[in-house]
Structure formats: structure tokens, C-alpha cells
Image (cartoon, rainbow, N blue to C red):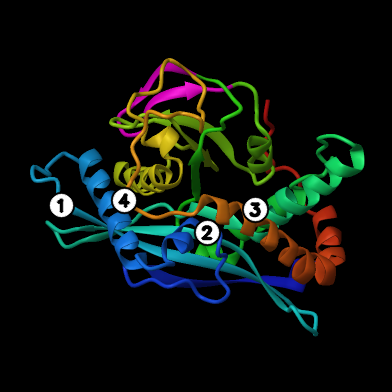
Amino acid sequence: MASEFTFRITTTRFDEDYSPSDNSRITTNFANLARGEHRQQNLRNALTMIDRRFNDLAHWDNPDRDRYTVELEIVSVAVQFAAEGEDQEFPLLEVLDIHVLDRLTGSRSHGIVGNNFSSYIRDFDFSVRLPAASEAAGGFSVPADFGELHGKLFQHFLDSEAYQERFTVSPVICISVSTSKTYRRTENHHPILGVEYEQKDPSLTDEYFGKMGLSVRYFMPRGSVAPLAFYFRGDLLGDYTNLQLIGTISTMETFQKIYRPEIYNANSEAASIYRPTLEQQDYSVTKIAYDRDERSRLATEQGKYADEHLMKPHGALLEQWAAGYSDACLVPVG
């Protein structure tokens, strides 16, 4: 069944000259920044924030805090179907990939892929399927197989030749902590990731990423004001170098400061018992335009697009394939 579809990877440089392509998910954070009158200044400011944060965390042998430059690429993954007809290719997901340029030595090293993860199928699940199930049940309701197809496709991609040929380490997806959960600071402290927080009541997002084979841990790096959620496959603390972890932190903390300043650009640090909130008033706003309302609205539109161009023409094939896919890699939560 897997021979019925394959994966194709394309890349686009993400810099101050970036413009979203016609087939790019327009709710993606980096695409949101790259539109409007001040698009180039938006991008330049965001990239500067990333570099400054990287050099702040990679402070050793870096007295002027300017040794490193972060280079970003948008990785677009399409699923290609062998069957003839329309909609033979569908944009499965997009992520940012990182390279780090050491300006002192001239060397360039590969960071961690997975930043700013976005997916049409996730839009379909959360913006189309979940509301439909809740409406039918007369209250909030989650389908029993919610996220399973998405999770299996994601894991199949990571194990594919297309991924293995290009990337040597597993991805890390770093996102905001949930505003519906409470996090408690622990005594565990990592030299790069910072102090660890715990949250023992899995959210729907935790469960969804668990079906993608990803575990979650929460860390607040030095200089940060709130913990970040790190979803990973393998050993978050052991599988990556310091510079790789710093690349993910500096990139994703910058985006969080831009579109969730109430949490990540707050003027006070998270307490030992922490409940994130978007109702916070004591925070600073970056000089970078970002349209959160547009992002939420377009997620629904893109969920409908996935229904029309993926699920309707290929849903039966994908469900048949998923039924035979091993669940051994799924991560239990709770």
C-alpha cells in the first residue's frame, strides 16, 4: 500500500527577500510575516531577533555576541499518489530547517528540522472534523481515531527514504505551552534548555502529537519568561548538540514573542506554578506585524481545502493504508 504514494521535499530560503509561494500554507507563521506593506522589515527584524537570541545563549568564546548567524529554509513536503487523475500531489506539511554559520571559523552546521510545524491535515482535523463531531454530539466530542491518520503519515515520512537522505536527526517541534493547563517548576536544570516544568494532565495537542510518535517536555531557557513545549522522538537531552538546541530555542522563542507576546514577551518571569494566559496585560509588543485573527480564520479555510483535495479523492486509500500501519511507534500519554 505504501507504494501507492511517496513523499517529495522542496526547499525555499527564508530570508528578508522571502515571498510565500502560491502553494504555501498561508497560515504558516513565516508566511504571515511576509505579507503587507512592511513585509521586508518584518522579516529583517524577526531574523535579527533570532540571531541575537542565538548569540546570547551561545555565549562561550563569543565575547561580542556576534559569532553566529542562523540560516533558515522552509521545507515543504508533498505526498504524491500513483493513481491517475486530479489531485495527484498534495502539500502534506511545512517546517523550518536550520543551519548555523560560525563566522569565526567559516563552518556551517546543521541544526534541527521541525520549527514552525504546520499541516493541512491538522487543519482538517481541528478546524473541520473536530467541530463536526462536537456538533453531532451536542457538545465537545473527540472522535476515537482523532489524529491517527495524520500521526501515521508523519511517522511514515520520518522513516521514508526522502527524509533519511536529507536529515540525520529526528525533528523537534517547539510550540507554546497550553493556556488551559497548569505547569509546575521542577529541580531539573539543563545547561541549554534551562529549568524544566511538568504538566501531568495531557492536552488534546499532547495526545495529537503522541499519535505522531512524539513525547513532550517543557523547559524555560535562561533569559526566557515562560516555558516552551518541546515535542521530540528519541532523547531530547541526548540526541542533539548545544548549538542545535540553541537554534531551535532562538527560532521558536522569537516567533512566540511575535504572535504570543502575552506569554513569551511578558514583563515578568513565569512563577513556579504557572498558568499561561492570553489575558495578560503586562507585556511588551514587538515591532513586527502579525495577524492572529487572519491565521485562525484561514486555518478553517485550509481545513476545508484538505477535505476537498485530499480526503475526498484519496481518503479511502489512506484509511486502508493506515489500517495496516503498525501502532508500535505511537507514544502513550497520561
The residue tagged 1 is 67
Packing grade of label 4 (10 A; few <14, some 14-19, many >=20) is few
Distance of mark 1 from mark 2, alpha carbons? 29 Å
Q: Give how far apart the Cα atoms at labels 2 and 3 are.
A: 21 Å
Mark 3: give few (<14), some (14-19) or many (20+) Cα within 10 Å: some
Residue 64 or 169: which is nearer the viewer?
64
Label 1 environment density (alpha carbons within 10 Å; few <14, some 14–19, many ≥20): many
Dot 1: element: loop
Q: For residue 256: magenta? A: no
In the rendered structure, which disc, 1 or 2, sits on the residue that comes first in sequence? 2
The percent position of residue 199, horizontal first and vertical second, equals 56, 22
Q: Position of residue 300 (x, y in %)?
A: 69, 56
Name the residue that disc number 2 marks: 28
Amino acid under disc 4: Lys
Q: Position of residue 230 (x, y in %)?
A: 49, 38
Q: Any mark on residue 78, and which?
A: none
Give whichever of 71, 296 is nearer the camera: 296
Residue behind mark 4? 287
Residue at label 3? 155
Seen in the picture, residue 96 relative to 254 is either above or below; the reply is below
State which region is magenta.
184-199
Apparent side of residue 59 relative to residue 165 in the rendered image (left or right): left
Of label 4 and label 3, which has the lower sequence position? 3
As shown in the figure, which amino acid type bears the numbered disc 3? Gln
Does residue 94 appear to the left or right of 316 in the view shown? left
Which residue shows up at 21% across the image and 40% down it? 56
Residue 224 versus residue 231: which sits nearer the camera?
Answer: 224
